[in-house]
Amino acid sequence: MFTQLIKITLKAPLVIYHLPNLVAGKIKFYPPFSLLLFFLIITTSLNAQDTLSSDELFINARTAAFDEDDYPKAIRITKKALEISPNYSDIRIFLGRLYTWTDEVGLARKEFDRVIETDPGYEDAHLAYGYLEYWNDNPKKALIVIEPGIEKNPDSKGLLMLKAKIQNNLEEFAEANKTLEELLVFHPKDSEARAFSQKIKDLSSKNQIGVDYDFVYFDERFSDPWHLASVSYGRQTPIGSVTGRLNYANRFTTNGVQFEVDAYPRISDTFYAYVSGGISENGGIFPRYRAGFSLYANLPKSFEADLGFRFLSFSRSTWIYTASIGKYYSNYWFNLRTYLTPSNISLSKSISLSVRYYLAGADDYLSLRIGTGLSPDRPENYILLDENNKVIGSLDQENLESSNISLGYRKSIKQTNILSIDVGAENQEYALDKKGYQFTVGAGFTKRF
């Protein structure tokens, strides 16, 4: 509009159309006055461009960065806003972030340092500066940067989560676990912190020992109860945790022993694996050989998933394939898992839903599990008897129905002592048109050190 006005002014005498004279058909020319009016319009227009407040310029800068993806433009507007309000911390932090995103690390540090110098303990400044150093592979400096912010803001979810990530990066797993415990005290419904805590809980100690015992009672099927017990020792290694376990069972008034090794090798921040193997001399109480493998993925939005297989060797070999999807939401963890066992004539299916309600940290929760079919990861399902009392693999009876439910409680004491109690019931069809209940009561104790 103003460009057109300039062109008109250059080509013709300056005129003012006085409304009464225009209506009467008369036009009067006022060259000096019209020139003055023209410059007034131009000056007013230019001043209008310069009278935006720092807040309005801040909004325009964010629009340029996020909506237009134009960082250079956003930087120019942000600098202009700082000319108006040089001590506006949020705008200066935003400029530091813009420099961070454009790899101007030195300039970003200067902006963050200036904010922290004038406004010590300002949460957003320490958070932005901490992530700058964390992303640029300076975890120790990042930790130094955020500590004063945490001292001033002890309940800051962002700063505590960043601190746990840094400590995990430095392989200070015990410290990271402690930081997450503090975060969850202030924010017990934070799903990201809950998932992260579960991921690193077993890394927080170099060693752990455990003992477990299960008592299994049958109302119809067997006259004698089963006794299952195990002792284990686990240790953190450079590749992940490795646990050796000695299992004992008394079934059918016969004793059996099995030795197992479980490992959880870390592949990356996203992937880790479960690798397991076991051997037993008494093939009638435990499978003579067993093995398992699963690949786990930590997914965005606090999801997780895994895919793998289990192998059991009785009088014949049985392969079972498994997959699950899990989700942390508020204080809850949900997991849906299936086991698929192919055979020559059909496909045996097992499905279960597990729910945990966390009362505090990663080892403090109530649990509920409901399902159908037999799980090969539960030792009480390793062995079944057919009608002729011949020992067979648990999943040979693939056409028989089963439904189960279990409740559990897990409690940590001073983070290094974990107690667990479980009770369960299963209604199992052990032969055609013959069903019976199986009741299980279990307890366990784990010591980390």
Image (cartoon, grey):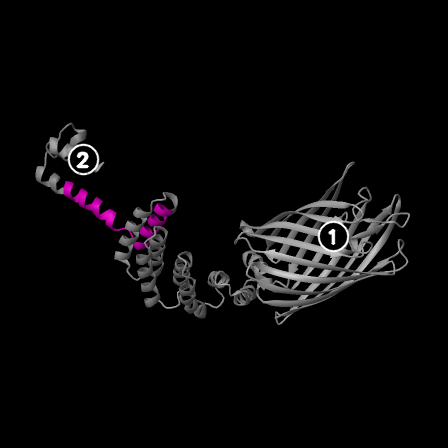
Specify the quadrant of the image occupied by residue 148: bottom left
Secondary structure of the residue carrying numbered label 1: strand
The residue depicted at 11 percent of the width and 41 percent of the height is 33
Does residue 88 appear anywhere in the picture? no
Residue 271, percent across and down?
A: 56, 51
Specify the quadrant of the image occupied by residue 35: top left
Name the residue tied to disc 2: 5
Q: Earlier in the sequence, mark 2 or mark 1?
A: 2
Q: What residue type is labelled 1?
A: Tyr
How many residues crowd around disc 2 within 10 Å: few (fewer than 14), some, or many (20 or more)?
A: few
Is 50 within the magenta?
A: yes
Q: In this view, does 304 lie above or below 212?
A: above
Name the residue tied to disc 1: 289
User: Is 435 situated left or right of 321 in this image?
Assistant: right
Does residue 446 appear anywhere in the picture? yes
Magenta stretch prevailing secondary structure: helix
User: Is 372 situated left or right of 263 in this image?
Assistant: right
Q: Is residue 35 above or below residue 96?
A: above
Residue 185, percent across and down?
A: 56, 66
Secondary structure of the residue carrying numbered label 2: helix
User: Is 331 situated left or right of 315 in this image?
Assistant: left
Name the image quarter holding the C terminus. Answer: bottom right
Query: Magenta region: which residues?
Result: 37-65
Q: What residue type is labelled 2?
A: Leu
Q: Toward the viewer: 328 or 198?
A: 198
